[in-house]
Image: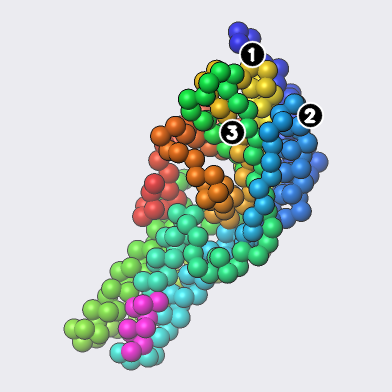
Amino acid sequence: METYPDSLDAPTLMAHMQALCKGIGPRPSTSEKERQAAEYVETTLRRLGVRDIRRQPFTSHASAGLATIPCFILALVGILLAIFGGSWGKISGSVLLLGSAYLFRQGVLAAPTFFEKLMSRRSSQNVIANIPASDQARQTIYLVGHLDSQKQRFQFPPSPYWIMKAQTTLPIAIGLLGGLFLLAAVVFDWDIPAFWLWLVGAAYLAGLLGALYDEIQPHVEGANDNATAVSLLLGMAETLQDHPLQNSDVVLLFTGCEEVGCVGMAHYLKEAAPPAETTFWIDIEMVGAGNLCYVTRHGISYMSGY
């Protein structure tokens, strides 16, 4: 392919963007608008001649706050027990603080917790399109973009990154250190000034109030996050239909419920279980946000890198 394909020029991609962001609008996870985005993708792929398309339904919770708010509440209960419950209160508080730290870390790693599974009662979907190699395939390349859009959150600003990483590290670090300290205080009969426990409780309360405030914010149209990726994948689908790769199958994976913890991706991996040795992944995010960046290590806290 010697010329730049028309399917990847700016007007073509912007038409998809307009359809998603203006025609459909904000696309909350598990919502009717997210389903409409999936239908737009599927309809467009069929119009482009892609034959191997399927939709994968699954259930999910509807907001990222459902993964963090219970952790703050759990920790606050633990602090109150430690203040008013004597030795047994400190032991119970220690368990709750350690549990909150573990669950919060699971949340920022996008790993499902037991209470998220209990809340996953709403419907969502992935759209999966396969474009086979023109010759014998030796590997599979996944191109990934998500259908849903996020709320206008103030707890997770994109810049500067260290503020976000610090504020998502504190609940883990405080829960871990506080839980161990309470347990040590009981074992060694240490006297803990109530002032320090109230201070830790105030920090957890601030985190809870911040999370609750984020939950009442409106959803955004999700242009950079992540209609850009969906548009690019649709352009790539048209290009690959005309010029398939010789020895690589390509899977275009449009996931639902990414913004609540990569739920759609988790369901796809559980079902498909692609072999790691012949599978390559390119997850596309925020194409229009600035300079081109390749991210090979990620993590939104200092204690949850991967």
The amino acid type found where label 2 is placed reads Arg
Name the residue carrying label 1.
4
Residue 212 image-quadrant placement = bottom right
Residue 31 position, x and y percent, is 72, 55
Q: Whole-percent x and y of residue 71?
A: 48, 70
Residue at point 40% right, 71% down? 99
Q: Is residue 46 above or below residue 27?
A: above
Label 2 residue SS: helix
Badge 3: few (under 14), some or many (20 or more) residues near its Cα, within 10 Å?
many
- Tell me which residue sits at (45%, 50%) in the image: 300
Contact, mark 1 vs mark 2 (Cβ under 8 Å)? no
> Which residue sits at x=40%, y=77%?
96
x then y, percent, for residue 266: 53, 51
Asked which secondary structure carries label 1, the reply is loop
**Magenta-highlighted residues:** 88-96
Magenta-span inclusion, residue 34: no
Q: Can you identify the residue that label 3 sits on?
A: 251
Question: Circle 2: is it few (<14), some (14-19), or many (20+) Cα within 10 Å?
Answer: few
Q: Secondary structure at mark 3?
A: strand
Q: Is residue 118 left or right of residue 20?
A: left
Viewer-side label of 3, 1: 3
Residue at 65% over, 35% down: 129
Q: Could you tell me if the residues under marks 2 and 3 are in contact, i.e. CB atoms within 8 Å?
A: no
The amino acid on which the numbered mark 3 sits, given as a three-letter code, is Val
Nearer to us in this view, 12 or 189:
12
- Return the residue at label 2: 47
Work out how far the residue at label 3 is from the one at label 1, CA to CA, in angstroms: 22 Å
Q: Is residue 83 visible?
A: no
Of the two numbered discs 1 and 2 in the rendering, the one whose residue sits closer to the viewer: 2
Q: Earlier in the sequence, mark 2 or mark 3?
A: 2
| Residue 134 in view | yes
